[in-house]
Image: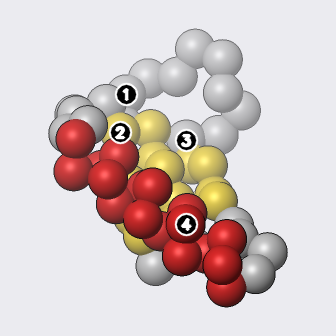
Amino acid sequence: MSELKLLQKRITPDADRVTLYAVDPTSAAKLRSTLTNFAQHNVSRDFSVAIY
């Protein structure tokens, strides 16, 4: 459903991507809305947010 990609050098995460999933259509709609809001209000060179 979505992917958060870390664009800077990592200190602790194992990988540079965190994938987010929803388990049902209601959760998917809420997650999509939350991530869209997050992406619009948190622009950074340190990470990118892709919503599918």
Q: Give the residue type at disc 3.
A: Asp
Give yes or no for contact between labels 4 and 1 (Cβ–Cβ under 8 Å): no
Left-right relation of 36 to 33:
left
The CA distance from mark 2 to mark 3 is 9 Å
Circle nearer the viewer, 2 or 1: 2
Upstream in the sequence, badge 4 or badge 1? 1
The CA distance from mark 4 to mark 2 is 21 Å
Q: Which of 22 and 49 is in front in this view?
A: 22
Q: What is the residue that sits farthest to the top in this orientation?
A: 11
Give yes or no for contact between labels 1 and 3 (Cβ–Cβ under 8 Å): no
The residue singled out by tag 3 in the image is 16
Left-right relation of 24 to 50:
right
User: Regarding mark 3 in the picture, which secondary structure is present there?
Assistant: loop
Upstream in the sequence, badge 3 or badge 4? 3
The residue singled out by tag 1 in the image is 8
The residue singled out by tag 2 in the image is 47
Q: Give the residue type at disc 2.
A: Phe
Upstream in the sequence, badge 2 or badge 1? 1
Q: Of the numbered discs in the image, which one, if any, rests on residue 30?
A: 4
The CA distance from mark 1 to mark 3 is 9 Å
Give yes or no for contact between labels 2 and 1 (Cβ–Cβ under 8 Å): yes
Q: In this view, does 12 lie above or below 16?
A: above
The residue sitting at 44% across, 23% down in the picture is: 9
